[in-house]
Amino acid sequence: MTTAQPLVSHLYFGDPRAHVFDGKLYIYPSHDIDTGAPQTDEGDHFDMHDYHVLSLDRVGGEVTDHGVALHIDGIPWAARQLWSNDAAYKAGTYYLYFPAKDKQDIFRIGVATSPSPSGPFTAEPEPIEGSFSIDPCAFEDHDGQFYLCFGGLWGGQLQRWQSGTYNPNVAPEPDADQPALGPRIARLRDDMRGFAEPVREIRILDQQGNPILATDHARRFFEAVWLHSYNGKYYLSYSTGDTHLLVYAVGDNPYGPFTYGGVLLTPVVGWTTHHSIVKFQEKWYLFYHDASLSGGRTHLRSPKVTELTYRPDGSIVTIDGSR
Ligand code: FUB
């Protein structure tokens, strides 16, 4: 079942990344607006300028919009397109990780800090060294180490980094018989403002142990990576892009490899699908978005939440995104 009602309707917010801080649920979404930018395969129509933070005391309760937490004018290196962000807490400071295109039109990932989970956040003057592409997910492991996963194909530019440097003249995806591109991961430094190690590619395998191929559009990674742990296992979930699914894969550590497990959410209204999974007040929830409130305008999305169920074997019950 899904909770069909948007969590808020006064503004549009996509890409809801939820965390529990201080016993409350905080949502870090993209703030969707219509600037008139043309709809392109590069995603120019996702032309966002700021971030807001939402919070709620209980699922089904009132949602507070804390207003602008970070604006593009306060990010010295960023030129346009504040896409999906995420947050982490460590030792009295909240960290907001966000992608934006720099002045060369290349996506980088920046970090901003605040003493409060709702901001306002102050951006570091430069993006994270060695960062690229989109959709950061900040994951805290049981041992207190933090990791940043990220990456997205097509307009998210991940395919342009296969050689290690930015190359705009590559095909959107590898050839048919090649493994699909995986999301990236790096452990964060103790100061949370940079990578502690070289960025690695996460491998996603099928149930026979073979890499998921680039042509396998119903299962290959596209964007919106999220990492969480459940019952001693690590769950990597992501959007399959042009097949509009959220799927998941299971592994034994944050770096993978991960084995494909199944569909998490069937297609929603709108092209993109994106999410986070969080345990709150003893229940597991899927936060996701759709474009139903805007009548299907794909860049104007609304956040939603529904309960998520694990089977005894650790697999996840598929949620119907059309309801
Ligand atoms: O919000 C812009 C982009 O749309 C995100 O970064 C993608 O994951 C997709 O949801």
Image: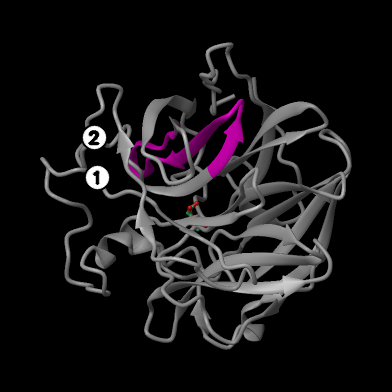
Comparing 259 with 117, the one in front is 259
Q: Residues within 10 Å of mark 1 (few under 14, many from 20)?
A: many
Q: What residue appears at the point 88 percent right and 37 percent down from the top-left corner?
A: 61
Q: What residue appears at the point 59 percent right and 35 percent down from the top-left corner?
A: 229
Residue 246: give x, y in percent of width and height: 46, 35
Which of the image's four quarters has the N terminus? top right
Q: Which mark is residue 180?
A: 1
Q: Is residue 251 magenta?
A: no
Which of the image's four quarters has the C terminus? top right
Residue 28 left/right relative to 266: right
Residue 106: image quadrant is bottom left
Determine if residue 194 is in view.
yes
Residue where numbered disc 2 is placed: 216
Q: Amino acid at mark 2?
A: Asp
Q: Secondary structure at mark 1?
A: loop
Residue 133: image quadrant is bottom left
Q: Given contact means CB atoms under 8 Å apart, are the residues at marks 1 and 2 in contact?
A: yes
Residue 277: image quadrant is top right
Residue 84: give x, y in percent of width and height: 55, 59
Q: Which mark is residue 64?
A: none
Q: Residues within 10 Å of mark 2 (few under 14, many from 20)?
A: some
Q: What residue appears at the point 36 percent right and 57 percent down from the top-left corner?
A: 200
Residue 88 left/right relative to 43: right
Q: Amino acid at mark 1?
A: Ala
Secondary structure mostly taken by the magenta-highlighted segment of the chain: strand
Residue 44: give x, y in percent of width and height: 42, 67
Comparing 182 with 67, the one in front is 182
Label 1, label 2: how far apart the Cα atoms are: 8 Å
